[in-house]
Structures are given as structure tokens and as C-alpha cells.
Amino acid sequence: MKKIIIAIIALIFTTSTSAHKEFYTIIVSLDGCRWDYPEWYDTPFLNYMAEKGVKSGLIPSYPSKTFPNHYTLATGLYPDHHGIIANSFINRKDGVVFSLGNPKTKVDSRFYGGEPIWVTAKKQGKRVFTYHWPGSDVKIKNQYPDVWFNYNKHHLTVSERITLASQAINGASAPELIMIYFEEPDHQGHNYGPQDPQTKNALRNMDAQLSELWQNIQQGPRKDSVNLIIVSDHGMTLVSPERKIECKKYLNPKWYERIEGNLPAQIYCKKGYVDSVYNALKDLQHQRVWKKQDVPAYLHYGTHENIGDVIVDPQEGWLVTDGTVNRGGMHGYDPTYSDMQAVFRAIGPSFKHIDYPHFRNVNVYTLLCHLIGITPAPNDGNYMEVSPILK
């Protein structure tokens, strides 16, 4: 009933005066861009967006990882509800391990629940072009976006993504929504940590690319009709070799089938041994341990069948691993931690000039649906939480 009410509210607002049938929306994700990077580093275009439009931040969904959160941005569902619950996990029905490193499972549609916005839009006669948005190269509900590229087989450079998106928005028949994904500054943030010259340079380069995209828009026929949104999936914090939790040495191998991930760690227990695993780990320092059903409600996690029986959630800056930890950056922690929160900027005819508090990233889907004038599918967002940023 709650989801039905939310959908009705969103429908009301998609017909309000701030949405316009001739407006177009471009959303760009800068992977791993902390909300406060623009305060640390020289980002003239992101600063320009803050001066002219919306300055805010996103509270990611748990776990604050790339694929779970990009699919949340596309569906408005928490990972617990759309099924991409981590970057790797076990499918309980057949034992297959979903992994981003496996090209076969990465595009296996059975793992992707919910309805991404490109499917919602297509049902309602709108078009969506995607340039490597995570999940866009998966045939979900027997559909792809109107334009998409296989990330592994037809990988586009940053420049190519900017060029193709610019051509699309300035073409004879522009799509209502364009979604673009960039790997930086996440890559350098992992390698060097958030406060490093290499990460600063990566962000500076991305800021220049965004500026180029905006200039291309301003020189085109729709310069007064395009809303540009910049988001990220999560933030980044520093990890170091000495901060690791070696939980395996406290566990009898007879107790569990497999441990997936290090942030959080999903422990798939053998029948009858959930309590044994939990009791062996619950008093260790620098981590929280939950049985699946006991994950705190505010994390919206623990109901999906593929989540591990026991979840080990390390303290910020720590990892659950028996291997080597290299000094660098990491994410996946509790989204309420400031370091995990992500950038949000928006500019265009639909947006106010406003400095707005950070909001849940499940609301981005309802925002996009409103901007392109479609009725949302059932989701976990609430349009009322983002309506104040709109004219």
C-alpha cells in the first residue's frame, strides 16, 4: 500500500508545472566522488553548478558499493529489494556466484529485480540513451535502453561518451533522458586514497569533461531546455594494512560454506551453524556482526534470500580479510558515515538555486521520472523529499 501511495503522489507531481514536455535530462555519475571533494579540490564546473543550481549530497544505500547503488539510482529500490545486494554474492537457488568480474553473471538478468528507468520510460513512450550506466547492458524484463553499449565488449572512452551524449542531445530527435557513467575518481581513490594528488587530478579532469559537456549543450538547439544532474554512487575513505579483521581464524570451516566480500562480509553458513558463527565473531573489535534477520532497520538490508546468514560489517577504515590490505581508498560502509556520502549537483530550467540537505539516493529515480514526465514503477523513494529542489 505504501508503494502504491508513493506512486500516486509521484504521478501527481509529474503533471505539475515544473515538469515540461520539451525539457530533457542528462544524469552523469562520477563513481566514488565524495560529497566534499569539491570543497577540497579545484572543481570550477561543479562549483558553477552549485552557484547556479542545486548543491546537495546523496546518502547511498547499504552496502555503499558501485553496482548496488547504481542500480538503486536506476530503480529507486534499495539493494535488498532489487537483488544486486553486493558486488559478489551466492544465488541460493543454484549456488551460482554473482560477480562483477564474471562477464557471464554480470549480465544475467535473473539477478536484476525491480524496473530500471529505461524500462519504465519505454513503456510510456519515452526514450533513454545510456553510456555504460551499470546494469544498462543487461536485458531486464526483456528490454534494453534505446541506446546502450556492452561495457566489456564495446568499451567507450571518456571522450567518446561525452561526444556521443552531446550528439544525442543536440540531434534532430533527442531522447528525454541520457545516463552517463564515469569510472573516476573512484579508480584513483582506490589506488591512492581520497586525499591524494592523483585523486585530485582525476577529479579535476572529470570536472573539465563535465564542463565540455555543458558547453556542448549551450551551443546546441536545446540549451534552455536541458536539466543536467551530477551524482555519485558513494564516497571513499582511507584504509591501511594494519586495519583488518581476520575472522576466518575464529571460525571452524565445518560451520560455513563460503564467505563473500570484505565490506561487508557475507557468511553463508551450513545448516545448524548460524549461532556458532555469530557467537564466535560477535565480540571482536572494529566490527558489527548481525544475523541476517537482525540487521538494523535503518540499513534496509537483510530480507533478500541471497544475503548471507551472518553479516560482518567492519568499522570505517577496516576490512574483513585474511589477505593483504594495501593503503588506499575503500567504500561499502554504513551510508550514514560522512565519508561514504556522495556528491549531488543539478542545474537547468526545472531546478531552483538552493543549498539542500543530503537526501536518500532512492529518491533519484522518482526525481528522474518527474523530470521526463512518466509514472514511476513501485519504488522505495518519496518524491516529496526532493520536490523542494524543483521550481
Image (cartoon, helix red, strand yellow):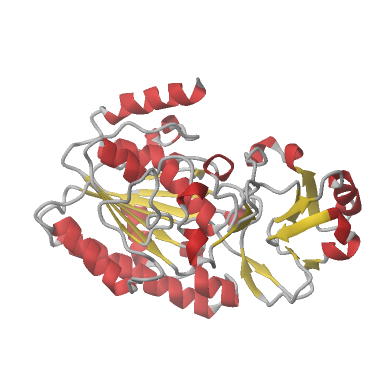
Q: Is residue 333 above or below residue 363?
A: below
Q: Is residue 328 above or below residue 233?
A: below
Outermost residue to the front: 94
At which x and y percent is residue 109?
A: 45, 50
Residues 274 and 67: in front is: 274
Outermost residue to the bottom: 198
At which x and y percent is residue 388?
A: 39, 34
Q: Quadrant of residue 165?
A: bottom left
Residues 388 and 157: in front is: 157
Q: Residue at x 68, y 61 (%)?
A: 261
At which x and y percent is residue 378?
A: 44, 31
Q: Quadrant of residue 87?
A: bottom right
Q: Residue at x 78, y 68 (%)?
A: 244
Q: Residue at x 29, y 30 (%)?
A: 14
Q: Is residue 189 above or below residue 33?
A: below
Is 383 left, or right, of 90 in this rendering?
A: left
Is 158 left, or right, of 64 in this rendering?
A: left
At which x and y percent is residue 239?
A: 69, 70
Q: Is residue 39 visible?
A: no
Residues 327 and 311: in front is: 311
Quadrant (top left, top right, bottom left, bottom right) of the C terminus: top left
Q: Residue at x 51, y 72 (%)?
A: 187
Q: Is residue 128 visible?
A: yes
Is 367 left, or right, of 102 in this rendering?
A: left
